[in-house]
Amino acid sequence: MAVSDLLLETQGLHFCFGKRPILHDIGLQVPPGSIYGFLGPNGAGKSTTMRLLLGLLRPAAGTVQLFGHDLARHQVALLSRVGALIENPSLYGHLTGRENVEATRRLRGLPAHRTTEVLALVGLSNSGGRLVKEYSLGMRQRLGLALALLPDPDLLLLDEPTNGLDPNGIMEMRGLLLRLRQEHGKTILLSSHLISEIEKVATHVGVIQQGRLVFQGSLAALQHRQADQTWLVLDTASADTCRNLLPQLLSGALLTGPGTLRLPFSTPDQVATLAQALVAAGQPIYGLRQEQPSLEDTFLQLTETSTAL
Ligand SMILES: Nc1ncnc2c1ncn2[C@@H]1O[C@H](COP(=O)(O)OP(=O)(O)OP(=O)(O)O)[C@@H](O)[C@H]1O
């Protein structure tokens, strides 16, 4: 994709807290109209990156381009087109949902009809008259999103928007994000440490591990990554014993349970040889099968093995 086609792009972004390097050479590429899942384990650097994107922190090196312009040079104008939900939204519990939206709307000098519109957008039209202290966590998150949507931004930056929500709240948030993209043309960058929450909504994915981007591309490309990889999974009585008895065949195998070993599948002959060797060594075979890694496995592999990249 040509550089100018990207709605959000960072180049060579570095950041340190004091002397401690936190982000290394982050090059995000967020296409317009995408839902970009920014994935990484706790402490990987997702929130820090999002703070840089919002101009809340300054990079040690590198640039942030929003809508084709340099954030450092046009911060106010560019951020007026961005809505953000970072951590828990600050809401007034003693006011109603509608009053909370009204307070922010007035502060920002936006037209009155926006309050009704954003409440409808996040599905809170009927609950707008209730006090926020009576809201569920899911409703609070959606109200936070309503505040972010007030200026009708082109880009939404959402930091772990489903964190702490129950399955129903997660489903509602997911439906809402899909609608915002499909029906309202929003581009959304959302962070999460769970691939399961991203894979149902994202069109694109960036995986960050220890401050480095270790994968970036379409969700299909991430799914494709696992397609050419197959595992051979052995269920037996004692995985450890098998590994000790057959070091040549099983030295590269991963113990995934007391009686389960996983190794890269190569050929059908490998299966036959292993089966024969196990029988000869007096070890039971409860199961010997080929398995395709799930998207979650791929994500775990990326975030476990990429520390040296
Ligand atoms: N204010 C701070 N001062 C010093 N170090 C910090 C500060 N904030 C975050 N860090 C460190 O920076 C690293 C990245 O943190 P960050 O919050 O960006 O990660 P994250 O991917 O958002 O994780 P989480 O999912 O836990 O929020 C972590 O090692 C964290 O300890």
Image: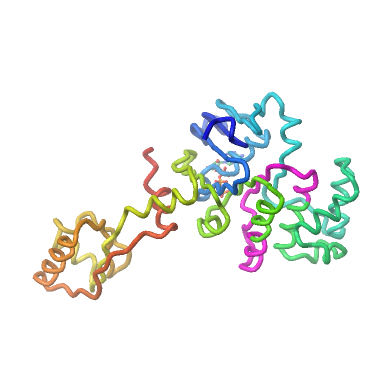
Q: Is residue 245 magenta?
A: no
Q: Is residue 303 left or right of residue 90?
A: left
Q: Is residue 54 above or below residue 72?
A: below
Q: Is residue 122 left or right of residue 48?
A: right
Which image quarter holds the C terminus?
A: top left
Q: Residue furthest top?
A: 73
Decide which of 229, 190 is in the foreground and name it: 229
Residue appearing at x 37%, y 54% in the figure = 226
Q: How is the image coloured?
A: rainbow
Q: Is residue 162 magenta?
A: yes
Residue appearing at x 55%, y 47% in the figure = 38
Q: How many circles with numbers are drawn on the protein?
A: 0
Residue appearing at x 79%, y 62% in the figure = 124
The part of the chain drawn in magenta is 147-174
Q: Position of residue 248 (x, y in %)?
A: 14, 56
Q: Position of residue 5 (x, y in %)?
A: 59, 34
Decide which of 247, 230 is in the foreground and name it: 230
Quadrant for ligand 1 reads top right
Residue appearing at x 80%, y 47% in the figure = 150
Classify residue 62 by image quadrant: top right
Q: Position of residue 33 (x, y in %)?
A: 63, 45
Q: Is residue 110 left or right of residue 291?
A: right
Q: Is residue 228 above or below residue 62?
A: below
Q: Position of residue 151 (x, y in %)?
A: 79, 43
Q: Is residue 282 left or right of residue 182?
A: left
Q: Is residue 172 above or below residue 180?
A: below
